[in-house]
Image (cartoon, rainbow, N blue to C red):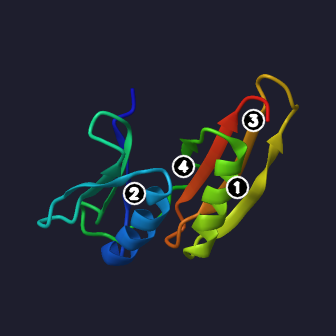
Amino acid sequence: MIGYVTLGSNDLDKARAYYDALLGELGAKRLLQVEENGFTLSGVDMTTPSIALTSPFNGQAAHPGNGNMIALQMQERAQVDSFYNKALELGGSDEGAPGVRGDEGPSAFYGAYFRDPEGNKLCAFRMGPA
């Protein structure tokens, strides 16, 4: 159902470099870049959900929303750990280290939370047993 989510940026070059390196861990790459407004779309391909970066349309400063978060599904817990560590290595900040939230079992939620350098909150997660 979701085609893409958009994050506003005050420094597109820095944001592009961060997300190129981070999303590259998932096999994603830049799919589209529009120079007129800076809109940059990254993903695995044009048929799967993607993340877009852009300067705000209204010309005002970009800022993270309170309560907004992007959650990226991983295939295994080790991938959650690796993705979270890469996010911090690239200049992101910790919002909750990898771990199980709730009970273990078939519906276990294993997640890690972080913010990108501009303060946008993301989660890497894996549903299911270890």
Q: Is residue 94 left or right of residue 67?
A: right
Numbered badge on residue 7: 2
Q: Residues within 10 Å of mark 4 (few under 14, many from 20)?
A: few
**Secondary element at tag 4:** loop
Q: Residues within 10 Å of mark 1 (few under 14, many from 20)?
A: many
Q: CA distance from mark 3 to mark 1?
A: 13 Å
**Secondary element at tag 3:** strand
Q: Residues within 10 Å of mark 2 (few under 14, many from 20)?
A: many
Q: CA distance from mark 3 to mark 4?
A: 19 Å
Quadrant where the image shows the C terminus: top right
> Where is mark 3, residue-wise?
109
> Where is mark 1, residue-wise?
81
Q: CA distance from mark 2 to mark 3?
A: 25 Å
What residue is rendered at 39% in x and 70% in y? 15
Amino acid type at circle 2 is Leu
Amino acid type at circle 1 is Asp
- How many numbered circles are shown? 4
Amino acid type at circle 4 is Asn
Q: Sequence-wise, which precedes: disc 2 or disc 4?
A: 2
**Secondary element at tag 1:** helix
